[in-house]
Structures are given as C-alpha cells and as structure tokens.
Image: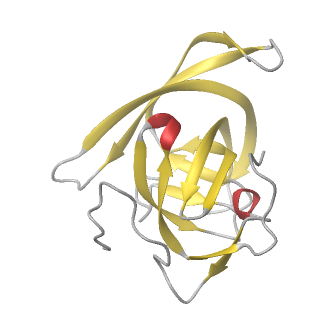
Amino acid sequence: MSRTPPTPDPAVLGWKEFVELPDWGLELRAKLDTGARSSALHVSDLDEIGEVADPATGVRLPMVRFDVVLGPKSAPEHHEVETAIVRHQIVKDTRGRPEHRAVVRTRIVCGPLDTIADVTLTDRSGMNFRMLLGRRTLEGHALVDPAHGYRVRAPRGFGGRRP
C-alpha cells in the first residue's frame, strides 16, 4: 500500500516516534513494532454509517465513524473521523487472541517516512501508545533503532518537546 517507492537508504527511526495522520488532522505518539504485522490505531465509538464508492475502482465500501482521543487523561481531546473501510481482517491481539478488526487506509508521516498504509481499528486502552506502526507499514521505508526513541524531530503542535 506504499504511496512512494522504497528509498535506497531507508530512514532510521526510534522504537517510538511522533506520527502525523494528515488526512485526519491528527498527530500522536506511536510505537514502532517490527514484531507486529499490521498497524493499529486506538479508537472508540466505532460505527458503520453507510457506503461510499471507491474512486479508483467504483466498488461500494462501507463508511465508518470513530473517535480518536488524544492528549492527557485530565484534558482529553476528542477527534471524530469518518473514512471508508477497505476490508476486515482477523488480527491476534497482544495476548495472542484473534480479533475481528475493520481496516482503513490513510497517509502516515513520520519524519522522512511518508506512505499510504492500512491501519486496523481497535481498542488499545491500557496500552502506552494509541498507535502501533507494524512492519508492513515500515518495510522498505525505515529501519527501527530499538535502543532509541524519538530519533526524528517532533511534529508541529508538540512544540519540539519530547516526553
């Protein structure tokens, strides 16, 4: 699902980085996990709301609306997103249990990584990161340095601060 061809010298990213989802106007911290096949985003209030025609194929795709909560627990920021579901898939959660998830497609920017990727929607409450970038998103585009986090500059909106 890559938007750009793999680079000959892939970027080196930390095991955790700030990620932008520009199609949805979101910036958040993500864990880069080469042990996970797919990328995942924590969402709540997930509802299918109708259908839309895929502009490339004309195939009717279900539309979904969900809430992404960002910011600290003391001052949460709710962001409502509407997008098409490209498919459903079974994914094993962190405990190894199969889970049926909706898969959406969006642009992901993390430093020099700028790609279109499939992202599963799930409940990641209790996890330290609201987003996980899996190896299908990273392969051919980035290497992960497991010894360091935040190897690329923090995106706008975080004031250059690093948690």
Look at the image and tell me whether residue 94 can be seen.
no
Q: Nearer the viewer, residue 83 or 150?
A: 150
Kindly identify the residue that appears in the image at 73 percent across and 72 percent down: 10
Query: Considering the image in quadrants, where does the N terminus appear?
Result: top right
Relative height, residue 163 to residue 57 (above, below)? below
> In the image as oriented, which residue stretches furthest toward the bottom?
147
Quadrant of the image occupied by residue 5: bottom right
Quadrant of the image occupied by residue 8: bottom right
Kindly identify the residue that appears in the image at 67 percent across and 55 percent down: 97
Residue 141 location in percent, x, y? 73, 65
Relative height, residue 95 to residue 45 (above, below)? below
Kindly identify the residue that appears in the image at 52 percent across and 36 percent down: 23
Residue 66 location in percent, x, y? 46, 30
Kindly identify the residue that appears in the image at 64 percent across and 45 percent down: 119
Residue 39 location in percent, x, y? 64, 53
Relative height, residue 50 to residue 38 (above, below)? above
